[in-house]
Image: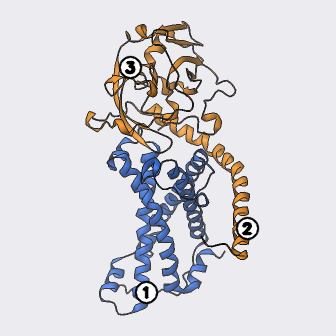
Amino acid sequence: MNQLNRRQAIQLLGMSSIGYFLGSCTNDLTTQVGNLSEPLNQSFGELLVRSQGLIPEFSASVIDPKALLINTYDLTPKIDPIDYKLVIDGEVKFPTELNLFNLKKLPFASMIMQHVCVEGWAAIVQWGGIRLRDLAQIVQPKAGVRYVLFGSADKYTDSWDLASALHPQTLLAYQMNGQPLPVENGAPLRLAAPIKLGYKQSKWVTKISFVSQIPQGGKGYWEEQGYEWFGGI
Amino acid sequence: MNKQPKKSPPVPPQTGFIKILHGLIIISLFLMMGSGLQIYNATPVFGGKSGWTFPKWATLGDWLAGGRNWHFTTMWVFAFTLLIYGIYILLTQRWKRKFVSGQDLQALKVGQNPKRRTYAWHRIIYTAIIPVLLIAIVSGLAMYKPAQFHLLSWLFIDWQTLRTVHFMTVPISLLFVFVHIMMGIRSGGIRLTQSMFRP
């Protein structure tokens, strides 16, 4: 390694301090820029969800199990399937609790979709489970409901707009690529929908709340740190 | 042919409107590239998670969500500037005079005047960037809303191809910027370049 001479050292120092200065001032600006376009981008996303019907599915031959990376924000929770309960509450007429036996008696739905991660990778996956709209039918959300909150066993949280949650291809899956859902992919029950980015698709879902307002700080784990809330694709 | 090609004056007058659009395209293009490389780094197009990433100085937005903020804000400026430019070209029939034509190709084939040849190359190059910028927008839209714009995504075969096409518009645009500056100076001198930036 050759040593830096004084001039180079001063230049490097200068460059890194400019970098530091730019870095600290773009931070606030970046947030402001995001806030500027988010309402516009969200209306654009909502418009597309409202006007669109079913997203075309992929053929089974392009399913790529290796492409689906595991992104978990914390630990993989241990859930005993016997004890597992899904709580559905909030502003609904008939709040309820369902165990896996009850859940699997509901109409089965399957789809082959592209799972798109915010990080830029994508994977084609088959998911099987129940439609979230069928669960909504059971609990009957009241008139003012606009959002759905999801709580998970690993404390991950997320929130969706009602229209996306009631989309016919929004599933709570217990099957993946024809097999029982693996625990690292969210067993016993996870969200799966072709219309949202991966971070919107909570794993190990234990609680679903239909609400008219998202509580303070309740947009979701990643959304509270700066990812866009709508996350539609 | 009843009209001889006119000899262009060395410094064409640029309208203020075109100068503004040109400036907006430059600024938004560089913001798109910086934030795009930030997004690239989250999962490199080449080599996946273990692939080579761009140095921090080449990226904009501090982290992935910040890069996305910039990218999905600037995309509106970038796309609408190009749209307005497109409408302007159509309305003023600028495409007839300012872009590459058969005469340029003829000049390259049989022309002896080196200045005319340089001018022809200059026009070919700045015409060629238009489809590249349009591909950047179309492939970007196909990646931004792959489910809702599934027909667009389908055009690009699969996700990896789509990402590759979108990414390749970055080196192509950078190369274009360099060549465009050089050719501008060669065909019209520094005065031509200045005419696009001076108020």
Q: Amino acid at mark 3?
A: Gly
- Give the quadrant of residue A94: top right
Q: Which mark is residue B6?
A: 1
Q: Amino acid at mark 1?
A: Lys
Mark 1 or 3, closer to the camera: 3
Q: Please give the residue where the numbered disc 2 appears in the rendered image.
A: A14
Label 2 to label 1, Cα distance in Å?
A: 52 Å
Circle 1 sits in a helix, a strand or a loop, which is it? loop
Q: Which mark is residue A129?
A: 3
| Tint applied to chain A in the drawing | orange
Q: Residue at x 40, y 42 (%)?
A: B149
Q: Residue at x 44, y 43 (%)?
A: A121
Locate the N terminus of chain A by quadrant.
bottom right
| Tint applied to chain B in the drawing | blue
* Crowd tier of the residue under label 2, counting other residues whose Cα lies within 10 Å: few below 14, some 14–19, many 20 or above: few
Residue A205, above or below B137? above
Q: Amino acid at mark 2?
A: Gly
